[in-house]
Image: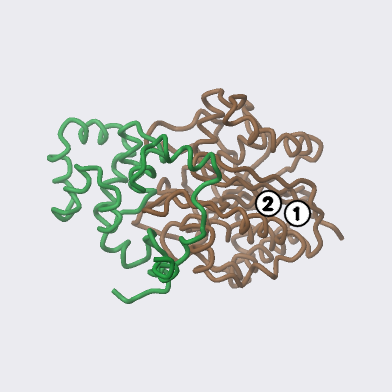
Chain colours: A green, B brown
Amino acid sequence: MQPQDYDDIPGTTVFDAERSRRGYHLNMFCMSLMKADNRAAFKANPVEFLQRFPMSAEQREAVLKRDWNRMIELGGNIYFMAKIFSADGNSFQYAAAQMTGMSQEQYAQMMLSGGRSPEGNRSKSEGQDRG
Amino acid sequence: MASIYAGLTTSHVPAIGAAIDLGKTRDAYWRPMFDGYEFTKSWIKEHMPDVVILVYNDHASAFSLEIIPTFALGCAEQFAPADEGWGPRPVPVVQGHAELAAHIAQSVILDEFDLTIVNKMDVDHGLTVPLSLVFGQPAAWPCRIIPLAVNVVVYPAPTGHRCFNFGRAIARAVDSYPEKLRVMIWGTGGMSHQLQGARAGLINQKFDHHYLDTIGPDPQALVRMPHLEYLREAGSEGIELVMWLIMRGALHERVKVLHRFYHVPASNTAVGHLLLENQV
């Protein structure tokens, strides 16, 4: 992949055309969960349901483990992944807390306290400077 | 002749829709946020538009990765609320204005803004949450709505400069429509938020206040902001703010700020709301 200026932003994966290409089948699987029949089939037998989509073994494993950050690495997009955690009955805050390694309570409290500060979170080099 | 007389901006967080649908707007968590919309809810009853052009983004509901239009104008007679994975929101079907939409499409394409015409499309929380915030829970929406969906999901979104100029083209299109119609334009999305990765939960209140203070009197100071600055300062999903510039471009150079509201948080997001009226 070509290096991009936004690669310097820590903890952030920009869903660009290249990632959209790599994650195409993973995201289209997510999209299928907008139909109630597919949600039921996925819940009944997730491994079998995932075989319907030409995804990589790594992508399938990340879905089964609900490993959101790994899905993002493999081309997943948050608005598509939302179909998975919505089908599970979970919220954006639930998934966001997991991606940041916090409990949902800790994460919700951080948001109530004004959210994550941009200070020290703007660039990877800034983070390194601060040791 | 038709004309645009006012615009507004608002965030469109899905949890706001859920709070309305589940009757939680008076809960301690939500009440301060909903109170910030009371002014606009009263104002619009006295200044009801015939048509709202509603700029929003689809969140992998109507558009998957199969087709990704940068600008998509809803030209249908009506638009159903989308099933986003937990059933459609219990809100009225959106009645479009197919004649004005077709006129806008023809006008802006000849004005060199090559948008996509959409004649069948469900609309998700990006469009219905702003309607609920401003109109509450009526049996039918009180005006016609033309959806204008902007791609901000697959990078890159259109530039702020492009969005602003597109707004100007929309205003020219509306001005050249022969029927007398009172039109509002709404720019939705934002403000700072990031929903993904280890930096999820980012909120930049300083950035947001500057944006709110500047877009009315001096939008030219914002139109050249590079995408990298949005991503860095306002979070990966904060780039939705470029949609506000379509709204701003469609208004006059001089606008009066009738109402300004800012609140943190609504779930993961900073909520910003402005009501702007055209000045001559």
Question: How many labels, in total?
Answer: 2
What is the number of the mark on residue B145?
none
In this rendering, the answer to whether B219 lies above or below B133 is below
Position of B57 with respect to B244 (left or right) is left
Question: Residue drawn 58% across and 57% down?
Answer: B241
Residue farthest along the front direction in this orientation: A131
Q: What kind of residue is marked 2?
A: Ile
Task: Chain letter for mark 2, please.
Answer: B
**In-front residue for pair B205/A49:** B205
Question: Residue drawn 38% across and 74% down?
Answer: A4
Image position, residue B133 (x, y; %): 63, 36
Image position, residue B234 (x, y; %): 53, 58
Residue farthest along the right direction in this orientation: B280
Position of B75 with respect to B274 (left or right) is left
Count neighbours of disc 2 (C-alpha within 10 A) and say few if under 14, some if 14 to 19, many if 20 or more.
Answer: many
Q: What kind of residue is marked 1?
A: Ile
Q: Which secondary structure, mark 1?
A: strand
Q: Label 2, on which residue?
A: B185
> Where is the N terminus of chain B found, in terms of image quarters?
bottom right
Task: Chain letter for mark 1, please.
Answer: B
In this rendering, the answer to whether B96 lies above or below B243 is above
Q: Label 1, on which residue?
A: B4
**In-front residue for pair A101/B77:** A101
Count neighbours of disc 1 (C-alpha within 10 A) and say few if under 14, some if 14 to 19, many if 20 or more.
Answer: many
